[in-house]
Image (tube, grey):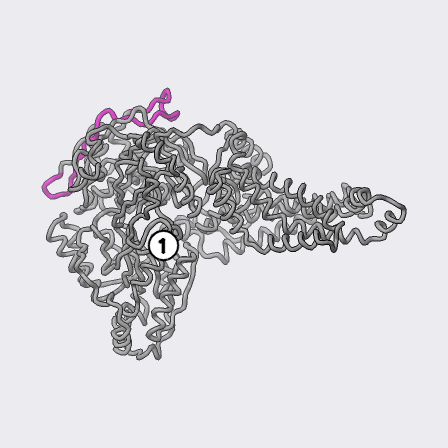
Amino acid sequence: MLTRFLVIFSASLFLSYCTRGSKVSENSIQFPMKMNLSSLDPAQASNEATNEVGPNINETLLQYNYLKRPLTVEPLLAATMPTVSKDGLVHTFKIKPGVRFHDDAAFKDGKGRELVAADFIYAWKRLADPKSKSEGWWIFDGKIKGFNEWRDKLTKGEATYETAIEGLQTPDDHTIVITLSKPYYQLYYVLTMIYSSPVPKEAVDKYGAEFLNHPVGTGPFVFVNWIRGNKVVLKRNPTYHGSLYPSAGEPGDQEAGLLADAGKPLPFVDELIFHEVPEDQPRWLNMMRGNFDISEIPKDSFDGAVGPDKELKADMKAKGFELKKYKVQEVVYMGINMDDPVLGKNRNLRTALCYAYDQKTPIERFYNGRAIVAHSMIGPDMDGYDESFKLPCKEYSLEKAKEYLKKAGFPDGKGLEPIEYSFPTSATGRQFGEYVQEQFGKIGVKTVLTGNSWPQFQDRLRNKKAQMFGIAWGADYPDAENMMQLLYGPNVSPGPNSANFKNKEFDKLYEEASKMPPGEARTVAYKKMRDIFAAELPWIPTVHRLGFQLSHGWVENLKPNKTLPNPFKYMKVNLEKKKALKAKL
Amino acid sequence: MLKFILRRLLYMIPIFFGITLVTFVLFNVAGGDPAAQAAGRYATPDQITVMRAEMGLNKPLLNQYFDLVTQLFTFDFGRSWSSKQQISHLITAGIGPSLTVTFPGFVISLLITIPLSLLVAHKRGTFFDKATLVICLALTAISSVVYVLAGQYFFAFRWGMFPISGWDPSWDGRWQYAALPIIIMVSLSLGSYILFFRTVFLDEMYQDYVRTARSKGLGNAKILLKHVLRNALVPIITLVVLQVPFLITGSLLTESFFGIPGLGGLIYQAIQEADFPVIKAMTIISAVLYMVFQLISDILYALVDPKIRLG
């Protein structure tokens, strides 16, 4: 033990001695991450911080247009959008020629080699390989011809990475042919996710399990170093293949100055520094001092920075701060275990609880007004989201709540055992729980709160032990299917349908919608599913949060969206403005 | 002395197995299914079974316990669940930053509090003594979060004397980031240390040998520095030596707020993410360190106080 400890410790000391602090370029973006970074391997991109850093190093076949809303997909490593067979099952992608991986010791002479189609297939096979323990396999699971069979054989030792897959062909170094086993209209969305980034086999072989600390990609920035628990530094990729700033956006972008750099090569800044700052105070103070360029506004600092009109206060504006508000494609909700013999079998009881929950107070109390009432499971700006749709029970009414409680067979809550409400333990989680307890108490329904560590909470959902639970879901891509799958029957626990909702009509519509291309017919199907949801109430949807992004006036080209994975390459620092505004801080 | 050390080392064996056994039971038996947690939220029963086999959880409990002991002796604790990083690397990389803050902080605290306590004890009953007592009690009554929040806000943000947070791994660059956390650590320990040392010195000051020394006409300075201080060394050594394991494991709160990549931050993050392999490794390492430094403190007793016969 001692020898091993001394060897590793000496190496750490040597490394820390060698890692001299270097001066940060003024032409850089410094961004505080709320979560600690865990890994830089695209196959392990389940962590929020990995999704913030990773897409700057590793790129994908497709990306979202930075300016257009709703988000639309465009080529990134693909030369053009793919050609598609008439039945919609065969998608042929041409890869941009001449794209090179970052220089790395894994390559011959340390020079990054050209990206080829096989790099994509290798990376996707890594997602499927159970040994990789990737949480990203779901993006291809059951979707590509022969891929699941290959995975099964690999697990049994009957296949290797060299074994061909029918649905993943590379006729030449710059062509990938994906053959789907069934229509999968979310394919292009998942191909924008960092999970699907190509990785060079040489680097994975060289670094082995340590590949998560040695990312090698084709992106606009190259990995420099990572001081775990502190920061990650990336610098501009000198051999970047050169994607360009978009030339068109949506109405208003021109006036907002978002098209001033149209057609210019990316990226604009020399360095990206991602700071790991889980605590609110240092994140906020560094932002106020100008050490960070962009940040969210912590709950406790909100009233000091933003007025009742939800606009920046005059002193903040005078210092050059700017505020951008945007809708987040997510839903916060109270899930109900539909397998529960009391709540799951009594729609009137669920309706009573929904009516009893006053949504307006928590929006101010817990979100500083940065949320809107959720009336369904579909997030804002997603296909099927209808601002005019109102879930009747979201109208707060104790009278109606009591009426439904009576109909449910529990007048004034009499005869009803206390309801168990599970939540992941945190100060805010408990406050929410206590608010739920207080609200349900007003109609005589007692609530028992169960705080859990995150793994315990997951365990309760996986084993259907929670009667009711507080949770949120952020969309992986801008398609309501991503929310609908949370209610699809075959996905019940341990799958993502933690409410264990089973409804034949809903499932049928889900299956039909999955075969439909985006369009009116699919939107109609989504709305029908929403109506079934509204009638059955397997969740009490609470809010859709709103994003409030604070930035310094020297950061240009900002158009925030949570689903967009790679905003940093578009950002630009106005150095003159930075000098002038920093003097005011 | 050698006999004593050998005997104490032998005593440590059952204690070591006791600690590891309790840790094993807490994490592997009573703490839920580690395989289900490691496999992720939507893992199927088959995937959990594969994970269980990979983690060696399908072995008999005795073998699993043996694996845990082996991990400690080989300093190979596997990989973190949340970050997938090698735990031994995380630990060794964190020791330096933690000690950069805690060691100077501790030494400065001792250099301030020992002489001050001696003076306060000497001035017992005076206004100076009473005022110091009140201030120390007030200092200990304030939560450590307040020290961290206020220190960061005033010293770093308002007055710009230090960086707000951050870290530079180079030896010459790290001090600018370590300075404020060191000051906060010293402030945090002032109250409790002075109260402790004052009591220790007062205990000694009323001993017969002090009265004898005084009656022999020895000056106050000589009595305090030569006799009282030396005789008070045993409790001081206990505090100092037993504090060392905590210096190594760092400060959870300070490291988290100041972005110091030390072991305190590592533990804090592991607790937040329920990263059991990291928590388990740190629990065992902390316990073993405590045992080792307990032994060192026992040996030092004999060196400073010949009355203590270790044999």
**In the displayed structure, would residue A528 be above or below residue A76?**
below
Image quadrant where residue A442 sits: bottom left
Give the x, y percent position of residue B57.
Answer: 47, 51
Along the viewing direction, whichever of B119 and A183 lies nearer the viewer: B119
Q: Residue at x 46, y 44 (%)?
A: B80
Give the x, y percent position of residue B86.
Answer: 47, 39
Q: Secondary structure at mark 1?
A: helix
- Badge 1: chain ID: B
Along the viewing direction, whichever of A513 and B270 lies nearer the viewer: B270
| Magenta segment, prevailing SS (helix, strand or loop) | loop
Give the x, y percent position of residue B112.
Answer: 66, 43
Quarter of the image that includes the N terminus of chain B: top right
Question: Left or right: A92 with respect to A44?
Answer: left
Question: Left or right: A386 with respect to B21?
Answer: left
Q: What are the residue bounds of the magenta stretch?
A: A84-113
Along the viewing direction, whichever of A173 and A415 lies nearer the viewer: A415
Image quadrant where residue A265 sits: top left
Q: Residue at x 32, y 36 (%)?
A: A160
- Residue extending farthest to the right is B216
Q: Which residue is mark 1?
A: B45
